[in-house]
Each structure stands twice: as structure tokens, then as C-alpha cells.
Image (cartoon, rainbow, N blue to C red):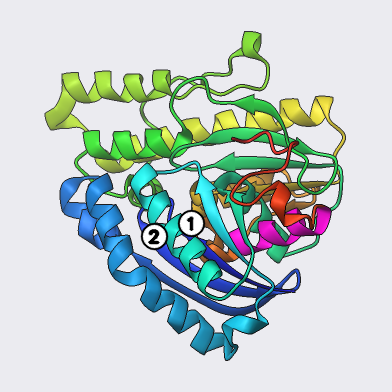
Amino acid sequence: MIILAIESSCDETSVAILKGEREILAHVLVSQIDIFKSFGGVVPEMASRNHVSVITKLIDEALNQANIQPSELSFVAVTKGPGLIGSLLVGINAATAFAYAHHIPVIGVNHLAGHIYSANLVQPFEFPLLALLVSGGHTELIYMHDHMSFKIIGETLDDAVGEAYDKVAKMLGLGYPGGPLIDQKAFLGKDTYQLPRPKLESHGLNFSFSGLKSAVANIVGKEREKIDVNNMCTSFQSAVMDVIQYKLEKTYETYDVKQTIIVGGVAANKGLRMMLEKQFSSKNIIVPPLNYCTDNAVMIAAAAYHQYRLNPNFKDYILGGQANLSLD
């Protein structure tokens, strides 16, 4: 099985070709991060236009890199959502046009399922497993008893953790994207600010980061000229890691899992990786390489492989999703 996958849900345009479950034949990506630094965040219409300008070139580049012809492809996979509507449509239109021209089926893949399956590229899944998805738009704890079977057992009630990072970075004048900048500075300071650790005992395994973000905003508003940026970054990141650690511990009390996977853009955070290694060394925890934590087409192909394997009847889910895919 050879899959060509396209990812364009936000500001990365990516095309990959995957053979079987894990053999990566090609992976090409164009990021727009440098373009949007001066804007302090992604401008949706600009992102869509930039996808249009490169997506067909990336398809050709991926085919050349893999040294295969379109006729050798089993099917095309494309991110169907969630994401920026304009950006998604560019990828979907490119995928359907390419598939139609070459008489190849096309499958729509849930972006969050793609993030989860980025970990399967590293090591085969062992069920039941727990997935912690942490990104700019999502913070979720997901229980899986089998492939492509997702049960959300905890989620954020307000801000996603990556969103909180970006907003705090903006308050501190650090620029965009904020997550990597705070992560870097967190190792240069000390935890001197008394920031809250929202544990939400009455809300089970759910998260909340708006109160933590507001606490930073209050301090910055009162003491802007006196703020030690490195110390604030350390304090903020320490609070976030304490919350994540607490929620994982509570989850393990309820769910007996063989494996834990940490995925999404925030999985690239050095502080998070160090906390996991220190606090959960006895657990079987898988974190993808840095280049597969952020948006990419390889993860979309990885999810599509199992989506097809479980339901090879294409007409049931062309640009759709399987019935038990509850991440829509």
C-alpha cells in the first residue's frame, strides 16, 4: 500500500508518501512561520493563498523524491479538518483534483487522528493506550482500545495549552510562535512568581488554562516595568507542567493502559519531555521526533493507513470519516 498524503490545515503545506505502515518514501514541507512572525499570528486568508502557490509543486517534488509514478499510488489522503477553512479547502481541492486526474481514490483524514498516529511511526501501538494531545488548538486526553477508536476522557474547558503559551508570550513581548520562546527562556530563570495550578477536582480529567493565563496578565499589568521575563517563563511553564503531571497521575488511577503517547505541537516542548522522563520513567511513553510533533503530511498518511485497513470500502468515507471517529 502506497499513500500520498496532503496536510494544509493551518500554515504548513506538506506532502508525504508512505509505503505500508511506516516506510516514509517522501516528505516535503513549506512553513509560513517566518511570514506570520510580524503579524503575531496566522492570517487565514494569507495562509490560504500561500498554500495555493506551493501545493502542486510539493506534490511533484514528493513524487520525484519517492521515485514513483501516480499510477503506483493506492490512494490519496488529505486533512479534512479541523483547521482553517480556507487552508483546508486548498488541500482538499488539490487532493481531489490529483486523485481524479489519475483515477485514484481519495480519503479525508481527521487532523487530530493524524497527530495521534504520528506516534505510531515511532513504535507500534500497544492497546489499550492513552493519548495526550497538546497543541495550539487542542488539549485532550484520549483512551484507545484499538486502532481508530477514540474516547475523549478529558479536555480543556477553555484555552488549549498551546494557545495559552502564545498568549502569555504576547503579553511578555516575546513574539510568535510563543511556545518555543517560552520553553527556551524557562531554562534561564527561576520559579519566583506564585502562579495557580488549576487542578479542577470537580471536573475530573478536564483542563483549564484561562485562569493561569489571567494570573500572568494581572501580574504583567501591575508590574510591567519590573517583570523578570525569564522568571515569568519559568513560573508559567512550571505551572503548566504541574497540571499536566497531575492529570496524567489521575488518569493512571482510573485507566490501566499499556502505553502512553504524547502528541501535538506542544509535545516538542523540552520542559514537557523532561518532566515525562523524570516523573513517569516507569511508564511506556512514546513521544514523536520534533519534526512529527508539528503539522505534517506523514502523520496524515499514517492515520489513513489504518483508516483504510479497517474499512477498505472507499465509497463509505470519501472525504468523510469512520463512524467511531469521535474527534470531529
Q: Which residue reaches farthest bottom?
A: 67
Q: Is residue 192 above or below residue 37?
A: above
- Count of marks placed on residues: 2
In the picture of the structure, the residue carrying the numbered disc 1 is 295
Tell me: residue 112, above or below residue 163.
below
Residue 279 coordinates in the image, percent (x, y): 69, 42
Secondary structure under tag 2 reads: strand
Amino acid on which the number 1 mark rests in the picture = Asp
Q: Residue 203 location in percent, x, y?
A: 63, 12
> Residue, x 24% and y 61% (percent of image)?
34
Q: Amino acid at mark 2?
A: Glu
Find residue 12 and name its label: 2
- Image coordinates of residue 166 in percent, x first then y, are 33, 40
* Outermost residue, top side: 202
| Dot 1 crowding, Cα within 10 Å, few <14, some 14–19, many 20+ | many
Q: Is residue 269 left or right of residue 22?
A: left
Which residue occupies the foreground of this view, 301 or 35? 301
Residues drawn in magenta: 299-310
Q: Quadrant of the C terminus?
A: top right
Principal secondary structure, stretch drawn in magenta: helix
**What residue is shown at x 34% (from left), y 19% (from top)?**
215
Q: Is residue 263 left or right of residue 235?
A: right
Q: Determine crowd level at label 2: few under 14, some 14-19, many 20+ residues with C-alpha closer than 10 A.
A: many
- Image quarter of residue 209: top left
